[in-house]
Image (tube, rainbow, N blue to C red):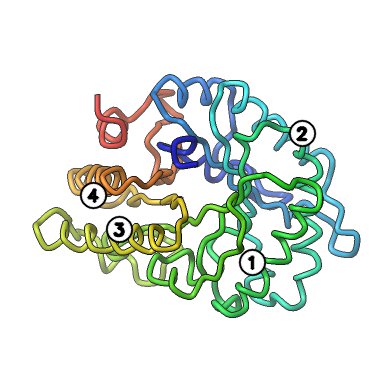
């Protein structure tokens, strides 16, 4: 399974916006050519299904939005890219999982049925970064409902499930996975947070961290320990593991960003973990949509020439 996923990149801020929001990144067919041509194996498509579905049963997803997602999925598959299609930014579920459980399950029932005929290179990620009221115990109750909804129409589809606490690798021990050999574990990696999110406007107080650098022996040892622990968990449980997001915000020191990105990527590969960088073309981006070109140093940190 990791051989299918291998090296990936996320198209964040494209399909994970609200109904009346303009996406910060407009997907273009050319971008998928760029990704394939650069040597990536996987694209991750974060999708905010909850913003484009009815609020009451049967929670129907808008056909026009489904067609937008269809286009992105099919364009990627046509280029023999593996696709990770997820459920992103369902804030109401994070706040009140009991009230939104039926809707969450209904969304996955529709998604699974719609894509049941797509090739096996399409994978489903059940929920991006469970958090807030979705405690580890609540998540272990919730994800089996979505898993069952997918399996009702698609018995062999690869699924990715990450731990609560925002897919933090340290939360892996609390994650209970099914006896299903078509399930992959996933974690996100943004450590140290004060480095990767310095200056991020959505993080209170992040401006205080501006100027934080990365790259000494202690820094490298911390990353090595974190990823080794995650890989050991995966090996112990007989699960492939995807580092489904990692990246450093654009306001971080440029040289440190490159060092951190290259080191996380190389450690993941050393440990046999697939990875998916966040993100393609916005504020963590390896690609510059204004110049219509890769940011070459960042691309080379991910895919050494």
Specify the farthest residue to the right. 57
Q: Residue at x 67, y 31 (%)?
A: 119
CB-based contact (under 8 Å), mark 2 and mark 1: no
The front one of 293 and 155 is: 155
Q: Where is mark 2, residue-wise?
A: 117
Q: Is residue 111 left or right of residue 245?
A: right
Tell me which numbered mark, 2 or 1, is placed earlier along the sequence: 1
Tell me which numbered mark, 1 or 4, is placed earlier along the sequence: 1
Locate residue 228, reporting x and y percent: 28, 59
Q: Where is mark 3, residue-wise?
A: 227
Q: Where is mark 1, residue-wise?
A: 91
Q: Residue at x 40, y 44 (%)?
A: 274
Near mark 2 (Cα within 10 A), the count class, few <14, some 14-19 or many ≥20, is: few
Locate residue 220, reporting x and y percent: 16, 56
Locate residue 63, reporting x and y percent: 84, 40
Label disc, if present, on residue 260 of the rendered structure: 4
Residue 267 vertical placement versus 57 (above, below): above
Tell me the quarter of the picture where residue 287 sits. top left
Looking at the rendered image, the disc whose residue lies closer to the viewer, 4 or 2, is: 2
Tell me which numbered mark, 4 or 2, is placed earlier along the sequence: 2
Distance (Cα) linking label 2 and label 1: 30 Å
Q: Residue at x 63, y 56 (%)?
A: 126
Residue 302 vertical placement versus 100 (above, below): above
CB-based contact (under 8 Å), mark 3 and mark 2: no
The front one of 285 and 110 is: 110
């Amino acid at each position: 399974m990791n051989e299918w996923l291998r090296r990936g990149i996320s198209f964040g801020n494209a399909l994970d916006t609200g109904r009346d929001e303009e996406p910060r990144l407009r997907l273009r067919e050319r971008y998928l050519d760029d990704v394939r041509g650069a040597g990536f194996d996987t694209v991750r498509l974060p999708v905010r299904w909850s913003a484009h579905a009815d609020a009451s049963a049967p929670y129907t997803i808008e056909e026009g939005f489904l067609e937008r997602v269809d286009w992105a999925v099919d364009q990627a598959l046509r280029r023999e890219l593996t696709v990770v299609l997820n459920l992103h930014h369902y804030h109401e579920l994070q706040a009140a999982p009991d009230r939104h459980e039926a809707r969450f399950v209904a969304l996955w029932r529709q998604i699974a049925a719609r894509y049941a005929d797509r090739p096996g290179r399409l994978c489903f990620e059940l929920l991006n970064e469970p958090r807030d009221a979705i405690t580890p115990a609540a998540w272990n109750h919730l994800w089996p409902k979505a898993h069952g909804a997918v399996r009702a129409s698609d018995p062999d589809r690869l699924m990715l499930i990450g731990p609560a606490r925002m897919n933090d690798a340290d939360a892996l021990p609390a994650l209970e996975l099914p006896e299903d050999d078509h399930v992959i574990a996933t974690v996100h990696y943004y450590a140290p947070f004060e480095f990767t999110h310095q200056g991020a406007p959505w993080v209170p107080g992040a401006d205080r961290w501006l100027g934080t650098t990365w790259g000494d022996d202690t820094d490298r040892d911390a990353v090595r320990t974190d990823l080794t622990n995650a890989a050991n968990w995966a090996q112990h449980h007989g699960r492939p593991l995807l580092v489904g997001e990692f990246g450093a915000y654009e306001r971080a020191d440029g040289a440190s960003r490159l060092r951190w990105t290259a080191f996380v990527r190389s450690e993941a590969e050393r440990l046999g973990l697939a990875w998916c960088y966040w993100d393609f073309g916005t504020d963590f981006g390896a690609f510059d949509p204004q110049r219509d070109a890769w940011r070459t140093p960042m691309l080379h940190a991910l895919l050494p020439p």
